[in-house]
Image (cartoon, rainbow, N blue to C red):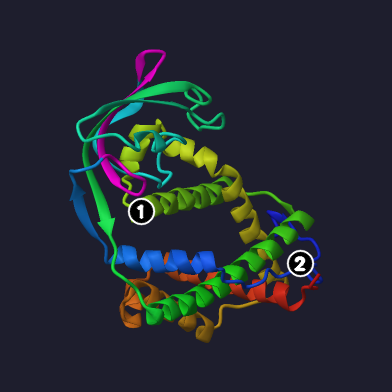
């Protein structure tokens, strides 16, 4: 990695580890998440749209009286209050009746990725075609305690990841790093794919999102540019630490990594091993060395 990195001093980094705090708000959201898994959708016919409903809508967006590209869709299931659409859109559907046509006037954020729409006032001619709501089961103390235990484990991992990221960022700031183009492309593509996966997990089709917002893969890549560059730089400096410390991907460490993969994917570890190509194995060994490099930073960090 010496061709890409002039490594700064990586021992004695002064970083305060964040605290592991589980808030009541997080507990309540965890409980709601449990409830949503077992919720049932019930069609509503005797009242207008309320916050929390799913309104099935047709819409067409107009800029200066002319429909704009990517601003139309039909039978779109929009959860009111989810923040999925442009700020202000969902709130203006509250009170609309089934079959009602609503002119939703909103303004795109000034930092909106589609430059031809950023900061522009538009009107979405919208028809409410159907209203449904979610009904949630009751939960007791047992579920609450399970949620708290799960949150504590998640919070520990989250804080650990955050702390490691802070240490890596601090080392990047102390180093000189040049990111090769192919590495940047891998990082930014991974971020875009993760973003799409998150959309799908929330019931949003990426193609529908693109249609609604006028976005595309290239614009999303632009959005993630800085994050992808920082991730690439972090990986390069950590690989440089591994090289400086002569860290190796030992067989037990690789086995532990493979066991974690098997648990994550719900597969027998032997099946995971059989599916690995040489490229996969090289990547795993690289990840193991980076884990060890992060441990070096943590072992030698100075708490503020």
Q: Could you tell whether 133 is left or right of 168 in the image? A: left
Residue situated furthest bottom in the rendering? 252
Tell me the SS state at disc 2.
loop
Do we see residue 50 in this rendering? yes
x 35%, y 72%: residue: 265
Q: Position of residue 138 (x, y in %)?
A: 31, 71
Mark 1 surroundings within 10 Å by alpha-carbon count, few (fewer than 14), some (14 through 19), many (20 or more)? few
Residue under pointer 1: 202
Considering only vertical position in the picture, is 150 above or below 40?
below
Q: Position of residue 147 (x, y in %)?
A: 44, 75
Q: Earlier in the sequence, mark 1 or mark 2?
A: 2
Residue situated furthest front in the rendering? 46
Tell me the SS state at disc 1.
loop
x 43%, y 54%: residue: 194
Q: Position of residue 83 (x, y in %)?
A: 43, 44
Quarter occupied by residue 208? top left
Circle count? 2
Do we see residue 258 in this rendering? no
Residue 240 magenta-highlighted: no
Residue 49 magenta-highlighted: yes
Quarter occupied by residue 215? top left
Q: CA distance from mark 1 to mark 2?
A: 35 Å
Residue under pointer 2: 15
For the N terminus, the quadrant is bottom right
Q: What are the residue bounds of the magenta stretch?
A: 48-67
Quarter occupied by residue 240? bottom right
Of 260 and 22, nearer the camera is 22
Q: Could you tell whether 234 is left or right of 79 in the image? A: right
Q: Could you tell whether 290 is left or right of 29 in the image? A: right
């Amino acid at each position: 990695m010496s061709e890409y990195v002039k490594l700064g001093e990586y021992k004695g980094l002064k970083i305060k580890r964040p605290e592991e705090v589980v808030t009541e708000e997080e507990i309540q959201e965890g409980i709601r998440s449990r409830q949503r898994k077992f919720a049932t959708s019930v069609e509503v016919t005797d009242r207008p749209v309320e916050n929390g409903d799913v309104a099935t809508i047709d819409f067409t967006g107009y800029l200066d009286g002319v429909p704009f590209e990517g601003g139309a869709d039909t039978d779109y299931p929009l959860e009111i209050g989810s923040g999925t659409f442009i700020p202000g859109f969902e709130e203006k559907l509250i009170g609309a009746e089934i079959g009602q046509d609503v002119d939703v006037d909103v303004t795109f954020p000034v930092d909106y990725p589609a430059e031809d729409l950023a900061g522009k006032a538009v009107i979405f001619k919208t028809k409410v075609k159907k209203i449904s709501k979610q009904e949630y089961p009751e939960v007791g103390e047992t579920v609450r305690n399970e949620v708290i235990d799960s949150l504590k484990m998640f919070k520990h991992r989250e804080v650990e990841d955050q702390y490691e990221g802070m240490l890596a960022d601090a080392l990047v700031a102390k180093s000189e790093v040049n990111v090769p183009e192919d590495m940047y492309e891998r990082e930014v593509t991974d971020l875009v794919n993760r973003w799409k996966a998150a959309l799908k997990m929330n019931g949003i089709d990426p193609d529908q999102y693109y249609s609604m917002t006028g976005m595309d893969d290239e614009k999303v890549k632009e959005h993630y540019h800085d994050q992808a560059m920082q991730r690439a730089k972090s990986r390069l400096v950590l690989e440089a630490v591994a090289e400086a410390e002569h860290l190796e991907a030992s067989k037990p460490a690789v086995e532990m990594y493979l066991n974690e993969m098997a648990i994550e994917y719900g597969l027998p570890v032997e099946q995971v091993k059989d599916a690995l190509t040489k490229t996969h194995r090289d990547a795993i060994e690289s990840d193991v060395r980076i884990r060890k490099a992060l441990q070096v930073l943590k072992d030698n960090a100075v708490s503020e």
